[in-house]
């Protein structure tokens, strides 16, 4: 039940961010992309919250969900996917930084360089932290 509450809080925060994004897009004449992203966040989070609410009403579903969240294979796959996503995004940002350098957009290249270095430093920090913790 604790995991369901954590997921519900996470989804509620994302729902609120989607609502803020949608309201900002409507009241400040932002582009359609911001409106679409806000609507998508609201829609997906609403459906997920309803699904969690339905699961929380059935004790058997709660037990099954908790078992699935702690299954080693699924946890391993999730960790591998998260790591691959992180390093793919870092590689894309690095490639964009190099392209900005060659096109002489120094400010953009510097900003992308800070993002790449920051993400790598955060990764190293959490690697050290979790190696000491576990």
Image (spheres, helix red, strand yellow):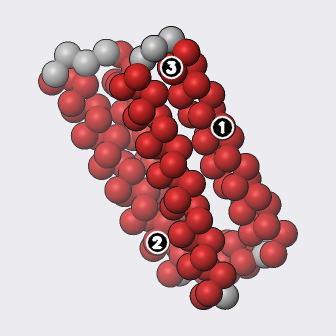
Q: Which residue is at a point 40% across and 34% down the rendered structure image?
A: 111
User: Mark 3 = which residue?
Assistant: 100
Verify CB contact (< 8 Å) between mark 2 and mark 1.
no
Q: Does residue 51 appear in this view?
A: no
Above or below — where is 38 with respect to 5?
above
Q: Nearer the viewer, residue 118 or 77?
A: 118
Residue at the image position 56 percent from the left and 79 percent from the top: 129
Viewer-closest of 99 and 4: 99
Q: Secondary structure at mark 1?
A: helix
Residues under labels 1 and 3: Cα distance? Answer: 14 Å
Query: Farthest residue in the bottom direction?
Result: 133
**Circle 2 residue:** 6
- Above or below for 44 versus 125: above
Give the Cα distance between marks 2 and 1: 31 Å
Spatial CA distance of label 2 from label 3 is 40 Å
In front of the other: label 2 or label 1? 1
Q: Is residue 128 visible?
A: yes
In which quadrant of the rendered view does residue 8 lie? bottom left
Q: Label 1 neighbourhood size at 10 Å, few (<14), some (14-19), many (20+)?
A: few
| Residue that numbered label 1 is attached to | 91
């Amino acid at each position: 039940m604790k995991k369901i509450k954590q997921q519900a809080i996470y989804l509620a925060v994302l729902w609120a961010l989607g609502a803020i994004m949608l309201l900002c897009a409507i009241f400040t004449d932002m582009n359609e992309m911001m409106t679409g992203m806000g609507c998508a966040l609201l829609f997906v989070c609403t459906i997920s919250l309803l699904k969690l609410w339905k699961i929380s009403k059935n004790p058997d579903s709660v037990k099954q969900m908790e078992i699935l969240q702690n299954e080693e294979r699924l946890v391993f796959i999730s960790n591998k996917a998260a790591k691959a996503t992180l390093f793919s995004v870092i590689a894309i940002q690095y490639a964009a930084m190099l392209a900005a350098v060659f096109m002489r957009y120094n400010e953009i290249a510097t900003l992308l360089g800070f993002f790449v270095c920051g993400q790598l430093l955060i990764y190293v920090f959490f690697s050290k932290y979790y190696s000491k913790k576990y």
